[in-house]
Structure formats: structure tokens, C-alpha cells
Amino acid sequence: MLASIGSSLLSRRGFFRSAIAAVGAPRLATAAGKADAAGAPLPPREGSRLIVSAPVLQNAAERSMGVAFAVSADASGWVEIASSPDMRDARRVYSGGLGMMEVNDRIAQILVRDLAPATRYWYRIGADRISYKGGYRMKNLGSEVDGNIHSFSTLGAEASGSFCIINDTHEKDAVLECVFSKLAKLKPSAVVWNGDATNTTEDWARALQTFIAPCANHPGYAADTPYLFMNGNHDFRGRFARHLERVWMFRDPAERDGRFAELGRNFVQRIGDVALIGLDTGEDKPDSHPAFAGIFQMDRYCELQTEWLAEEVEKPAIKTARFKVVVCHIPLCRPERRNPGIQSGDGSIRGGCAAWSRPCGMRWRPLLVKAGVDLVVSGHTHRFAHCAPFADCPWPQIIGGGCNADPAVKRGFPTVVEGRVENGRLCMRVHNCVNGKIVCEKALSCT
Ligand SMILES: [Fe+2]
Ligand SMILES: [Fe+2]
């Protein structure tokens, strides 16, 4: 990053919170950003700041990058991206597709495509303020440009650097504070947010707060560090959870075959010798559970991912990787049998919460064995654990920690799971974000 985002965006933080409170809470907008029947469109508020958050780099990839930021009134957002910090060859990419650009009074989401793998880029964000008084009465009131120039590098087999995995932050300020502080020190090439970022998401305001401005002291948490996001079970809860892609966009559809169009969160991404494989374990109860009212299809979702995975394990991104790391929110198996896991097709579940996903584990295991997976990193149990391979689970597992940042509490501390290739081995370190200590260090040799 060339210019400090600190002072200007910190001062905007208060404004952003009030902007969200003012424009976000009462209405649920459609995908096109229009107000629903319960609310009238907001008038443009000239003179107020239009861009009210730092950019969030969503869905790190080889050839594309998602950029999202919050706005306070009807706006069409854009990104200018360049191959050097002087921005001389910058090209502008607008939100929305071709034809009609997106206008939204809460967020701008821009998918930047046609990037080169393993390449550093510089970018800045801006937005055109739009006065909308009807289909024939629109005015462009001019652009607001964020003065900060940020930078990121695309992923790929030629990329270098480390990756980090976080989980179960559950919108807790103290947890986010210590997790983002640790990430700021580690400076990974990419971060996987491995689920349960949310608790229950009922509306726009909550979703914006969770993903666009989650932590007061880290307003630019993802402005220069690209993130990948994978759902946890809590990220499926709430009315607005059905539309989380309006705040954290789905991955570039060009990454997958059309019949897998619904798999907007799954990924296979290389960072040098490592292939990160993102799988969505869905909810932690079967579809037939009474709490789900018969409106969940997680079993079919898992099945479709199995079909997708069967094709992915045959592709070079996985086949040529020296290390294969699966990232999924719910563990795929557990050595102890106290918790029976999700019972496929069975509405009963002891204790109301499954510690591992039997349906996903059973379906994916043969493919992961075939692919020679070296490690699975999960979360969900809110207790850090390292599990050695056992009969049903022929790979080591790291389960990230929980969301208790109280130093007096020894269990449930939040973690950052760090991975980097050193001297031909994949070195995994699990950081306790409360006391800063490394609680687990393992080096995996190439299989
Ligand atoms: Fe959780
Ligand atoms: Fe969970």
C-alpha cells in the first residue's frame, strides 16, 4: 500500500457506522439494488461522503479479483487497476456486467478480470454518484475517488508466499481485533476465512458490518490482502444469509463449468506449490431437522460438490501441486465417536449440534484419498485441535480455534493457521491470537 488508509478511513469509521445505520437496516434491496416494496429509494445526499469503507479484496484467484466497498447513496462503483504504482496504464472496471452498470445505495462490487497469474497490481476505488428519479430521469452527479492506492498479487502456481486460515470469528470485536492484528504481522499472500464469520444475518446492515467493516482498528483488513471465503453453518442462518453474495460476491463464474454454476464458494487455488481446495460443508444438521422447516437442500449441495470435486482432482492445478490442503468449515471426521456427526437423512441429532459432517466426509473421502490430500483444515468446534491420521481419516487435520478472546479462559481461543513452504516442506503453524504463542507446529513432507 502506498498511501496510508489509516487516518482517513479511521475517521470514516464513525461515519460508516452511521451511514449503515441510516441506509442499511430498514430495507431489503433486490439484487439490482432497488428498494423493495417496503421502502422508497433514498434521495442522493449531496455533500456527504459517498465511499464509506476501505475496499475488501474478495475471492482471490489467478486471473480475477473481486473488490467491494460500501457507499452511502445511489452510486455506480469502479476500480482503476494498473501494473505499476504510478497508475499510468490504469484501466477502469465498473460494477455490474456489460450493458447496464450496477447502481446500489449500499455497496459497490466490482469483478476485475483478465489479470495475469502471480502478478502484482495496484488499484484505487471510486464511485459515480447517481441521482435516480425514474428510468428517464437519471443524472450522474460526478465521481468521488478514494485517494489511497492499494496493491495485491494474484495467485497461481508461480506465486510465492504464505497463506493463512481463520475461522469462527462470529462477529466478536475482541476476536476480530486479535485475529486481524496477527494477520497484519504475518502478511500472508492470501487469507481463507473459513466460515462462521456471522451468527445470524437478517439484514443488509448486519452483513455490511460483518464483511465490509468488521473491526474498528482494522478498516483496511482486506484492502491489500486478498481473501477467500468459505461458508460455515452459521453463514446459512438468517433472512439475508440467502443473499450474502450481495456483500461477499460469489467467485468468478468463469472458474467452473456451467453445471456447477451454483457452487459460487468452492475453489481450487494454487499458491506456488500448494493447492488450496475449498469445500462447503453446509449446515451442521440434516435437511430433515425440524429447525430447517423443509427449506434446506444441503444434501444435494454436498452431492453436487462431490461431482465438482471428482472433476477438479483430475485437473493440473491439483495434480501438479506438491501439497494439497483442503479447507472446509466442519471437520470431515473425528477420531472420537462421542459425537455422532450429521446423520444423513436422519432428523435426530444428539445435543443439537454435530461436531463433524458424516455425509460430506463419506462422499469426499475417496476423492481426497485419490488426490493425495496432505492436510484438512477445519473449524466449527471452537477448540483448536491437531488430529493425527486414523483409519477413517487418512490425513492429518488441524481444527482452528474458537471465539473466546478472554486471556483468563484457556480453551476456545481464536487462532490463525499459517502455512508456508520452507525447504521443500509445508510448514504449518497455529497461532494463539490471544497470547501470541504458537500452539502447534508441523512440517509436512511432499507425498
Ligand atoms: Fe462457530
Ligand atoms: Fe460452525
Image (spheres, rainbow, N blue to C red):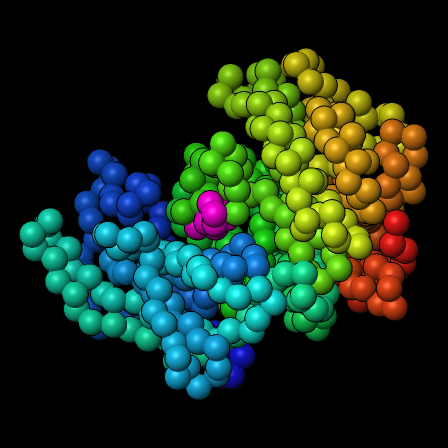
Instruction: Note whether 199 is above or below 320 in the view shown.
Output: above
Residue located 82% across and 42% down the image? 372
Q: Is residue 434 visible?
A: no
Magenta span includes 249: yes
Residue projecting furthest to the left: 136
Kindly report the secondary structure that dominates the magenta region of the rendered protein. loop
Closer to the camera, 43 or 110? Answer: 110
Residue 282 spot, x, y in % from top left: 61, 33
Residue 7 spot, x, y in % from top left: 48, 80
Residue projecting furthest to the bottom: 86
Which of the 4 quarters of the picture holds residue 381? top right
Horizontal side of 137 relative to 265 (left or right) equals left
Horizontal side of 206 relative to 297 (left or right) equals left
Residue 380 spot, x, y in % from top left: 71, 40
Residue 299 spot, x, y in % from top left: 61, 23
Residue located 11% across and 53% down the image? 133
Residue located 89% across and 32% down the image? 335
Residue located 59% across and 54% down the image? 228
Closer to the camera, 225 or 400? Answer: 225
Instruction: Note whether 390 is above or below 46 in the view shown.
Output: above
Magenta span includes 153: no
Query: Where the N terminus falls, by quadrant?
Result: bottom right
The number of discs equals 0
Q: Is residue 324 visible?
A: yes
Instruction: Note whether 92 is above or below 21 in the view shown.
Output: below
Horizontal side of 106 relative to 206 (left or right) equals left
The residue segment tinted magenta is 247-254
